[in-house]
Image (cartoon, rainbow, N blue to C red):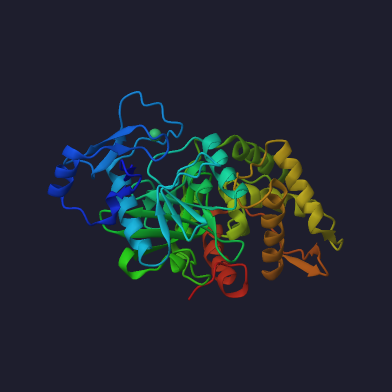
């Protein structure tokens, strides 16, 4: 902790930046420090490895048990406090008694900022988030700088924890993730998050130096921005060229369905089952799995008969119930929204690309859906289709 009470009840804030090490060494000889939560005595730690901080004495049994704080956590918290201090009213480690929570920072009386440098158990995360929201606070999770694994220049490995920590911008379909590195004093903001598979996610990345961005701007990622389409296309190509040894259960199931219904191998999934849609983050199953399952359903509809989007949504919901598709647990949408959003977007994208005809919220096949067994030809088609998607489809992630 960076704050403690003194004998006279005043708060000593080590992040305030006014203390010389020598004066703290002097103070430690004469003063006593108390935990603002349990009022038990604390030690002032003035070591050389971690930032200066307060710690409970052994077996202190404080009702607020936070996680142990690393060097990274203490440094990041201090820097974020100083940064916010010039912009808005900010409290360091305030104890919110009604929630028994102690966010790292509370900005403008409402934004509970958690600088999270360690993984948090899902249940604990849900409990904390709900407690903040129920009491009128807005939780903002900022990850410690080293916690996002990069797979290639624009591809990242996300766990369920990362998705939990995403926020939604003013536009509802754009979750983004924030992390902060105290070493470089830089935020990493990942937006336009479009997963390719359960764990790999393409993202637009921005590095934002602490001195050059405001709190308000940090929380407002631009709606427009380049998406790494080239890398997406390369990933699709790699998917077609690589052998598929370790398929997920739902992908293995799809492989059989494709073979039985269409007599095509798994590498010949149609090009339009790889559309990078922003709402695709709602599905945990790989992009080509959920899109191909919908294509197979569309294919079974009679030519020249209209169907409603709800029918396709119901089919996807049934596949979810049967565990042939998986939705992602996201804090922003309900389970039913997590199915209807991407399914509706996908039908609209197929309409804009000419594979479906849309009239008054109903769709019908145009006869252009086809299933080909030639991977070489498909790789060429992937390129053409992605170009058309970018230029003709308003659901494509926007480019500058
Ligand atoms: Zn305490």
Total label count? 0
Residue 277 shows up from this direction: no
Judged from this view, the residue extending furthest toward the left is 22
Residue 385 shows up from this direction: yes
Closer to us: 278 or 10:
10
Residue at the (72%, 54%) spot, across then down: 340
Judged from this view, the residue extending furthest toward the front is 8
Residue at the (62%, 59%) spot, across then down: 272
Judged from this view, the residue extending furthest toward the right is 305
Q: Position of residue 46 (x, y in %)?
A: 19, 41
Q: Position of residue 14 (x, y in %)?
A: 27, 49
320 lies left or right of 392: right
**Rendered-image quarter of ligand 1:** top left
Q: Position of residue 176 (x, y in %)?
A: 50, 58
86 lies left or right of 106: left
Residue at the (37%, 57%) spot, across then down: 153
Q: Position of residue 31 (x, y in %)?
A: 23, 40
Residue at the (42%, 65%) spot, across then down: 88
Judged from this view, the residue extending furthest toward the top is 59
389 is higher (above) or lower (below) than 111: below
């Amino acid at each position: 902790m960076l704050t403690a009470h003194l004998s006279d009840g005043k708060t000593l804030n080590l992040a305030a930046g006014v203390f010389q090490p020598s004066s703290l060494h002097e103070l430690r000889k004469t003063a006593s420090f108390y935990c603002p939560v349990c009022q038990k005595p604390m030690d002032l730690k003035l070591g050389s490895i971690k930032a200066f901080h307060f710690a409970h004495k052994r077996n202190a049994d404080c009702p607020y048990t936070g996680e142990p704080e690393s060097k990274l956590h203490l440094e990041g918290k201090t820097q974020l406090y100083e940064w916010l201090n010039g912009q808005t009213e900010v409290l360091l480690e305030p104890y919110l008694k009604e929630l028994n929570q102690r966010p790292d920072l509370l900005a403008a009386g409402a934004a509970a900022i958690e600088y999270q440098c360690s993984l948090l158990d899902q249940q604990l995360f849900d409990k904390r988030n709900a407690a903040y929201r129920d009491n009128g606070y807005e939780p903002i999770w900022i990850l410690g700088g080293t916690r996002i694994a990069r797979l290639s220049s624009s591809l990242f490995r996300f766990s369920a924890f990362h998705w939990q920590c995403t926020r939604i911008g003013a536009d509802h379909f754009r979750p983004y993730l924030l992390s902060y590195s105290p070493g470089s004093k830089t935020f990493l903001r990942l937006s336009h998050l479009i997963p390719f598979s359960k764990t790999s996610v393409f993202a637009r990345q921005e590095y934002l130096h602490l001195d050059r961005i405001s709190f308000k701007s940090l929380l407002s990622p631009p709606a427009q921005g380049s998406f790494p389409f080239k890398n997406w296309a390369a990933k699709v190509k790699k998917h077609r060229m690589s052998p598929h040894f370790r398929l997920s259960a739902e992908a293995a199931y799809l492989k059989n369905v494709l073979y039985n219904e269409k007599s095509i191998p798994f590498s010949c999934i149609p090009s339009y089952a790889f559309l990078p849609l922003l709402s695709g983050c709602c599905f945990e199953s790989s992009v080509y799995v959920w899109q191909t399952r919908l294509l197979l359903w569309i294919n079974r509809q009679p030519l020249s008969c209209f169907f409603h989007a709800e029918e396709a949504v119901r089919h996807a919901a049934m596949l979810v119930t049967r565990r042939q598709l998986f939705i992602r647990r996201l804090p922003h949408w309900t389970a039913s929204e997590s199915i209807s959003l991407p399914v509706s977007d996908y039908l609209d994208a197929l309409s804009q690309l000419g594979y479906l005809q849309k009239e008054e919220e109903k769709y019908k096949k145009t006869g252009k859906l086809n299933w080909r067994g030639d991977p070489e030809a498909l790789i060429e088609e992937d390129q053409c289709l992605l170009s058309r998607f970018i230029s003709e489809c308003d659901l494509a992630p926007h480019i500058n």
